[in-house]
Amino acid sequence: MPAHAIAPADITGLLLAGGRGSRMGGVDKGLQRCNGEPLALQALRRLAPQVGTVMVNANRNLPEYEAFGVPVWPDSLPDYPGPLAGFLTGLAHCSTRWLLTVPCDTPLFPLDLAARLAGAAAASDAEIAMASAPEAMAGSDASPVLRAQPVFCLLRIDLHDSLRRFTESGGRKVHAWTAQHRCVTVPFDRPGDAPDAFFNANTLAELQALENR
């Protein structure tokens, strides 16, 4: 392995399950069942083989998440301020050089997500690697366009203080913070990449669609 390469053991995986679930009626999205199992558990199983260790960011129903057998950490910021609060919590509790974040509502994400983000980060000496994937434009017959997937991020551990300052000043947008750092975007549009790998269940209808896939 090249000296600059990032090994799986250098990465901690963080499952983001700390949101309000507003578009799903306020339910705890990660605990909603899809084909008989909680979404969060399915995502965790997909994440664990790709990294050295895993943990969960959740703000409700902590015993249910703890039953998955991994550490669970709530936001350090109040009032559900969004994914950056989860990033901050993960960086604060991460003991490896890198943190990989994935959301609880996208259980089909690529099996080589960590490897491809890590490879791109190492090759370009980036501090952040962010996934992007093809998305069809609503109501359009045009070809899908690549869109960033900002909650699928590989972050260097030493970004903690930068993110703490950003969130303390009221910053909440992932892109606004990542733009301050060396960030490489990694497209997941190779031949053979699943077109629905980043399909997420934000609503009950989308949860049903996910179950039917």
Image: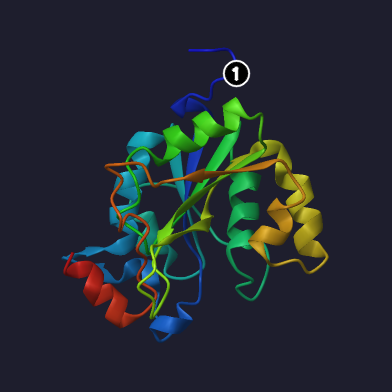
Along the horizontal axis of the image, is 67 left or right of 209?
A: right
Q: Nearer the viewer, residue 118 or 81?
A: 118
Pick out the residue farthest to the bottom.
Answer: 25
The answer to whether any part of residue 95 appears in the image is no
Q: Nearer the viewer, residue 69 or 188?
A: 188
Is residue 63 shown above or below 187?
Answer: below
- Give x and y (percent) for residue 64: 35, 63
Q: Residues within 10 Å of mark 1 (few under 14, many from 20)?
A: few
> Residue placed at 80% from the left, 63% from the top?
168
> Residue placed at 58% from the left, 58% from the top?
86
> Residue placed at 30% from the left, 63% from the top?
39
- Give x and y (percent) for residue 113: 41, 41
- Give x and y (percent) for residue 97: 61, 31
- State the residue position of label 1: 4
Along the horizontal axis of the image, is 168 left or right of 3?
A: right
- Give x and y (percent) for residue 175: 66, 59
Q: Amino acid at mark 1?
A: His
**Quadrant of res 211:** bottom left
Pick out the residue farthest to the front.
Answer: 142
The answer to whether any part of residue 5 appears in the image is yes
> Residue placed at 27% from the left, 64% from the top?
38
Q: Quadrant of the C terminus?
A: bottom left
**Quadrant of res 51:** top left
